Image: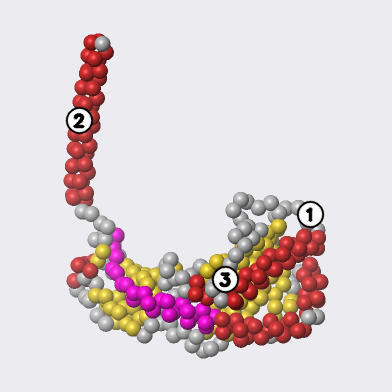
Amino acid sequence: MMKFIIFFVYVTLVYSELHSLITTYTGIHGQTVAGIPEFSAVTTLDGRQIDYYDSEIKKLIPRQVWMKEFASGDTWKEDTKIRERVQQIYKNNIPRLMERFNQTHGVHVYQRMYGCDWDDETGESRGFDQHGYDGEDLISLDLKEFRYITPVLQGVPTVMKWNNDREQLESLTQYYKYECINWMKKFLNLANTTFRRTEHSKVSLLQLDPDYYVECHVTGLHSKETTILWRENGQDINNLMMLGESLPNEDGTFQRSVTLFVHPDDWKKDQYVCVVEHEGKTTQKILRADEIKSNYRHPELHHSIIVIWMGINTAVVLLVFIVIQTMRHMKTKSDKAF
C-alpha cells in the first residue's frame, strides 16, 4: 500500500468542502492469507465506499443504497468488465516487476490509485494517477507536464512506453479534467437526493457523570464539514472547547461532537448553547440539566442495587441447595425401598 500522511487542521468556520472520487486497484502475487483476494477494486466518494470488486466474488457490488439504482445500467456492466481486464493485467505485470527488482519469491503488491478532487466553492479540481509497488511509489501521472514520471530505475521502461502513447495520455487528461468531475457530481447528487429523504440531523447533550465535561453530539450530518461550536452568553468560546473528528455512519451520513470544558457549577451562572450550522440551517441546544443524557448512576443507588441483587442471589442459591438436598433424600429413600 502506498504511504500517505494526513494532517488534520481545526477551523471554526467552514465555507467550502473538498470532495473526492477515488478508485484503488490492488493486486497481490504470492501466497496470501485466506480471505484476502489476489485482486480487488474499491471506489470511494468522500471517503465512503460506493462500489467493490474482487477476484473471489468476480462481480461489482454497490456499497451504498443510492448506488443500487446506478448499478442496473450498462455503465455498471462495462465497469465490471474493466475490472476483470485489470485483474488479468495485474496478474501478468507483477511477475515482470519482480524480475526488474531481482525478486524470485515472496508476496508482492501492486497498487494503483486514481481519481480527482473538487472544491464545491471555488470550482477548482485536481486529477491524480499513482502507481505503487510493495508500498513504495513507482509511477505517477504528471498532468501539468502531460507525462508519466518515476522515482526509481525499475519504472523507467514502463514510463517510456506509456509516454509514447500520446493518444492514451490525451484520453486520460480529458478524463481527469472533465469526466471524473462530472461522475463525482452525478454521484454526489444521487447521494444527496437519498440523504434528503432521511431525517434531519439530531443534536444531543451527553455526559459521563455530573462532574464531567459535557459533549454536544450531532449525528445524521450529510457533510463532513459542519460548523459545531459552543457559545457563552452569545459569544464563541473556542478556548474552552474541543472539536472531534467527523465519523461515518452506516447509512452514509456523519456524526461529530464538540466537548465543552466548563465545570457544571458554572452552568448556573452563565448560559451555554451548542450551535450547529448545517446546510444553511442553524440548530441551537441550550445546556440544561434536564437536556443531558447520561448513563451515570448515583453511588448510593448503585450500592443499594448491588445489595438487593446479592440478597436475591443468596436466596436463590439457598433455595437451589434445599431443593437438591430434598431430591437427594428422596432418591436415597427410593433406592433403599426398591
For the point 28% across and 78% down, the residue is 284
User: Is residue 283 or residue 76 the one in the foreground?
Assistant: 76
> Circle 3: is it few (<14), some (14-19), or many (20+) Cα within 10 Å?
many
Q: Position of residue 186 (x, y in %)?
A: 52, 82
Q: Quadrant of the N terminus?
A: bottom right
Q: Report if residue 142 lies within the magenta region.
A: no
Say whether disc 1 or disc 2 marks the residue closer to the N-terminus.
Answer: 1
Q: Quadrant of the C terminus?
A: top left
Which amino acid does the dot numbered 2 rest on? Leu
Q: Position of residue 107 (x, y in %)?
A: 70, 55
Q: Which residue is mark 3?
A: 43
Left or right: where does residue 309 sit relative to residue 50? left
Quarter of the rendering containing residue 42: bottom right
Q: Nearer the viewer, mark 1 or mark 2?
A: 2
User: Is residue 234 or residue 102 the one in the foreground?
Assistant: 102
Check disc 2 and report its element: helix, strand or loop. helix
Check disc 3 and report its element: helix, strand or loop. strand
Alpha-carbon span between mark 1 and mark 3: 32 Å
| Residue bounds of the magenta highlight | 184-208
Which amino acid does the dot numbered 3 rest on? Thr
Q: Position of residue 233 (x, y in %)?
A: 24, 80
Say whether disc 2 or disc 3 marks the residue closer to the N-terminus.
Answer: 3
Q: Which residue is mark 2?
A: 319
Say whether disc 1 or disc 3 marks the residue closer to the N-terminus.
Answer: 3
Quarter of the rendering containing residue 273: bottom left
Q: Is residue 264 visible?
A: yes
Alpha-carbon span between mark 2 and mark 3: 62 Å
Relative to 226, residue 102 above or below: above
Q: Report if residue 195 lies within the magenta region.
A: yes
Q: Position of residue 149 (x, y in %)?
A: 74, 76
Quarter of the rendering containing residue 130: bottom right
